[in-house]
Amino acid sequence: MAIWLTLLGFAFLAFIVGLIMLFAQSKRKIGIYVVSGASLIIIASIIGIFISFGNYTKLQQQVATYSSDSKNGNTKSEGKETYNVNWHNNADGMDKKISTVAVEKKVVHSTMEDKDMPGTLTIAIEIKNNTKNELLSYPLQGELTTVNGQQLAADIILSDLIDGKMKPGATIKGTIVFPLDKLDKVSDIEWFEFSWSTYNKDKLLKSDTGRINLKK
């Protein structure tokens, strides 16, 4: 869309210049050509903008549909286990908790990879800032590793956690969804490790859960 908008801007300027040239007797013929050409480009640019906007809207609707289907259970689940892991860590002036982890074998569309995945691993996380400074914490940009060697990135659209700025005393809480590229059955995921970055001013703080075993 940006290209069409830029082209429209140049065409509009050319159209104005052409109109000015029409008032000059010596350049009237050139002005006619400039106005005609600019008019055609303006029309083409407007059509291009509408087409681009339509494609963008369609993409947004697809993303919303994938997200809605995943969260409303419109795709068939072939099994799900929820584990009470109760992981807790208070290093670096933060209370960090992962209460539950859910592994589900159900096809979801990964909006980050733009493809269907056979299942998900979802963690319920809570982080509290106990420092006197504003922190920037990014668990949604963290990395999760599972027993079968998968290194996974969170799907921001499917997750409901909002990370980023944390004022002193503030808490962020929600779920992070990791689409699984490989999953034959729920019990395949026996453990995982999760790590993410937080910034205290210019200092990088790395949080790492270590291995968390998933047992009923």
Image (cartoon, grey):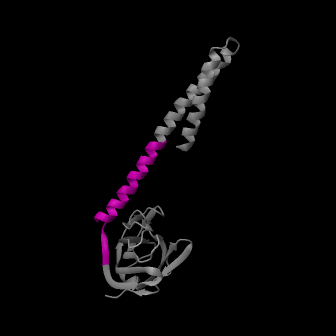
Residue 182 image position (x, y, % from top left): 45, 75
Question: Split into 4 quadrants, where in the image is the C terminus?
Answer: bottom left
Q: Among all residues in the image, which is located at the extreme right?
A: 26
Does residue 147 appear in this view? no
Residue 160 image position (x, y, % from top left): 36, 66
Reply yes or no: does residue 212 show up in magenta. Answer: no
Which contiguous range is marked in magenta? 52-80
Q: Among all residues in the image, which is located at the extreme front?
A: 132
Residue 183 image position (x, y, % from top left): 41, 76
Residue 193 image position (x, y, % from top left): 46, 82
Indicate the quadrant where residue 100 lies: bottom left
Which residue lies at the image location 41% right of the left edge and 47% below the top edge?
A: 57
Which residue lies at the image location 38% right of the left edge and 84% below the top edge?
A: 88
Drawn side of residue 35 relative to residue 110, left or right: right
Q: Among all residues in the image, which is located at the extreme top?
A: 25
> Is residue 96 positioned above or below 174 on the image?
below
Which residue lies at the image location 54% right of the left edge and 39% below the top edge?
A: 5
* Majority secondary structure of magenta residues: helix
Indicate the quadrant where residue 62 lies: bottom left
Indicate the quadrant where residue 22 lies: top right
Does residue 61 appear in this view? yes
Total number of numbered labels? Answer: 0
Which residue lies at the image location 51% right of the left edge and 73% below the top edge?
A: 200
